[in-house]
Structures are given as structure tokens and as C-alpha cells.
Image: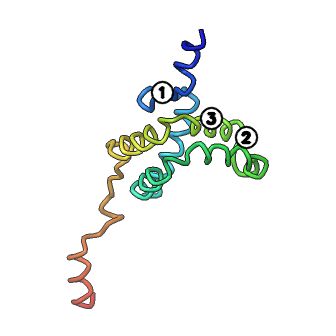
Amino acid sequence: MIKQWLAHAFAVERPEDFAPTTEQQEIADRICREIIRRDMVTLAILSLETCRPLNYIGAQAIHFFSPFLSFLVDPKSQTIFADFLEKRGSIEWLCQRLETLSASPSNKQSASPDQNPDPARSETVNRDGS
């Protein structure tokens, strides 16, 4: 009896077994899209990988500061995201999701010719004085 109980006394979840709920995935996708919109994917992935061992502490900090953060973020979303970060595989999933969303063609902005004029053409126009 005691041997069976002790067999799993120090077991921790495997990061590979992590799968977010639909609410957690929606919130994480919203955060990922905002990171992509600001063109900060590389910095975000670097920061997430660096702070990977501290994800549980970060989740607890979100819980702790929730009264102050409630002015900026919906309290329910904040709690769901903190619960998401408490899981062992959440940082790896978030990094992979950032890479997937940033590589998708829907996030690549196609610039119109009016937004990005030809630099060679603008130089000749300026040299001619016209």
C-alpha cells in the first residue's frame, strides 16, 4: 500500500503531455497575434526560453498582482492565462504557437506599391531635382 503511494509521490507532469483548453488557447493566440503585430517574435521567444524555469513563479505573480492588473486586463482572462502558465509545457507550446502563427501566410502583410515606393526610383527623382 505505501509502496504504491510512494511510487507516484514525486511524479511531475511531462511537458509533452500539455494541451491547453480552448479558452487558454484563445487567450494565448490573442497574445501571440499582438506580439506578431508588433514584430517582436524573436525577442518574445528568446525571453520565454530564458525564463522557462520561472513560468510557475510568473503565474503566481499574475495571481498576486491581479487586483492591480484588473484595471488593464479582464480578470477572467488573467486567471485563465495564469492557470495556463502554471502547466509545465505551456512555455514550449507558446513558443511553438508563436513560430506557427508568424510563419502563416495570413500574418505576412503584403505591402502595396503606394506604401513602399521603389527606393531606386525615389533616388533618381531626388537627383534630378524633380
In the image, is 119 to the left or to the right of 77?
left
Q: Secondary structure at mark 1?
A: loop
**Residue identified by numbered label 2:** 75
Q: Horizontal and vertical percent for residue 88?
A: 51, 35
Look at label 3 and name its amino acid: Asp
**Which corner quadrant holds the C terminus?**
bottom left
Q: Tell which circle, 2 or 1, labels the residue nearer the N-terminal end.
A: 1
* Label 1 environment density (alpha carbons within 10 Å; few <14, some 14–19, many ≥20): some
Give residue 19's mark.
1
Spatial separation of the CA atoms under disc 3 and disc 1: 12 Å
Considering the numbered disc 2 on the image, is that residue within a helix, a strand or a loop?
Answer: helix
Q: Which residue is mark 3?
A: 83
- Residue 78 x %, y %: 67, 41
Estimate the spatial distance between the alpha carbons at disc 2 and disc 1, rounded to whole Å.
22 Å
Q: Earlier in the sequence, mark 3 or mark 1?
A: 1
Is 13 drawn above or below residue 30 in the view shown?
A: above
Give the camera-side residue of 53 and 127.
53
Residue for point 69% across, 47% down:
73
Q: Amino acid at mark 2?
A: Pro
* Residue depicted at 20% across the width and 83% down the height: 124
Residue displayed at 62% across by 46% down: 57
Q: Nearer the viewer, mark 3 or mark 2?
A: 3
Q: Residue at x 51, y 50 (%)?
A: 34
Q: Measured along the vertical axis of the image, is residue 75 above or below residue 9? A: below
* Residue 8 sits above or below residue 28 on the image: above
Query: Extreme top residue here?
Result: 1
Q: Amino acid at mark 1?
A: Ala
Q: Secondary structure at mark 3?
A: helix
In the drawing, does residue 63 fall left or right of residue 112?
right
